[in-house]
Amino acid sequence: MEFGFSYKAGLFRHMPVKGFMKTGTANLPLHWGKAPPWLFNRMKKLAREIILIMVRDYGSQEIIRRLSDPFWFQALGCVLGFDWHSSGLTTTVCGALKEAGKGLEHETGLYIAGGKGGTSRKTPSEIVGFGDSLNTDPENLVYASRMAAKVDSAAVQDSYQLYHHVFFFNRDGDWSVVQQGLNYDTRYARRYHWLSSEKLDFVCEPHKAICCNHRGQTLNLVAAEGKQNRKASGSLAIEHPDKVFAEARKIMNLDLPSRHQVLKEDISSKRMYTILIKTYEAQPKDFESLLGLQGVGPKTLRSLALLSELIYGASPSFKDPVRYSYAHGGKDGHPYPVNRAVYDNSIEFLKEIVSESNIGESDKKKAFKQLSMFYKRS
């Protein structure tokens, strides 16, 4: 079974989007299967009450911020009763949140687009579909969604293939991304979190926090130390291919170190020449525009990065940028089977909080706020 993630959009135009950051990465063992209906229905109900309370008490911007935190997101999944260490937590929690939020958008101002597999490719149209309710241009959000996916699928080459992409946003254009990739060789999934913020860059150190259990050979084209390589790659992309290949032929007999993870034939292939024709005709103004160009994927970027090192001496970076399950139990019985009665009581408890008026700082509200401890940073 093969999963993919792609957008058909030509050259992504460089848009004045709000800043952004990649807040973290989480590695999870690859587990097959899905949540049973009895559990998923409860997850939706509990997620609905959590969304309503958090938006009321903190606002939509805060829930977007918390969803971008890999530890808080994991804690939320555990509170909802999913397996604390399963790759399925990502897709199931996002699915429960999306289902729970349907019909509440006008009340909460919180919108959710995307999903797993083919649903991920509907993200742009789903974002645009909410356009009339937004105080910002939805195309800015579409651009942010596309570029977050392009960075984690092409600019950070860590052997995880994206198959899940969910975009959370509000009326004012604040957004976060939760997306996940699979590595069948290691049988692990890696989750990537993004958050909109000011004065940050898609192509230079977008990460803020990293959670990794497995590290490997990674070509990281968004590392700070790779700035000159990005600049050189952008320069090569707008040169005529004949000139680039003339330079490349001068060094074809060089023995390349294995860490580059690219074959010599990648440089001289017909496909590479075709791609260079496309980039030459498009004349992308910088590395971000190059990254957004349709057809420019991992292989093209690896080749440009290698050529940039060989021709200009501009080296890319090969540095990999990469507990709370006791509330209701876990689907697979760890640390204990889900207690359905306790789970249902939690749903009713939160419904009661939502229905109360002028709750102030009641004991129940304080109890709910303990969830924030799950993501509190030192």
Image (cartoon, grey):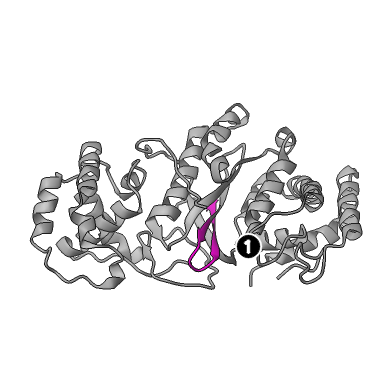
Image point (69%, 54%), residue name:
34
Image point (25%, 50%), residue name:
234
**Magenta-colored stretch includes residue 323:** no
Quadrant in which the C terminus appears = bottom right
Report the front residue among 62 and 219: 219
Please say whether residue 59 is visible from this viewpoint.
no
Residue 151, horizontal then vertical, whole percent: 42, 53
Residue at the extreme front of the image, as rendered: 1
Residue hosting label 1 = 31
Residue 354, compared with residue 336, is above or below; it is above
Which residue type does callout 1 highlight? His
- From the viewer's perspective, tell me whether residue 310 is left or right of residue 261: left
Task: Label 1: state its secondary structure.
Answer: loop
Residue 366, horizontal then vertical, whole percent: 84, 60
Image point (90%, 53%), residue name:
349
Residue 296, horizontal then vertical, whole percent: 32, 46
What is the chief secondary structure element of the magenta stretch? strand
Report the front residue among 158 and 292: 158
Residue 271, horizontal then vertical, whole percent: 24, 47
**Magenta-colored stretch includes residue 188:** yes
Report the front residue among 125 and 22: 125
- From the viewer's perspective, tell me whether residue 104 is left or right of residue 314: right
Residues in magenta? 181-196
Residue 170, compared with residue 330, is above or below; it is above
Please say whether residue 107 is visible from this viewpoint.
yes
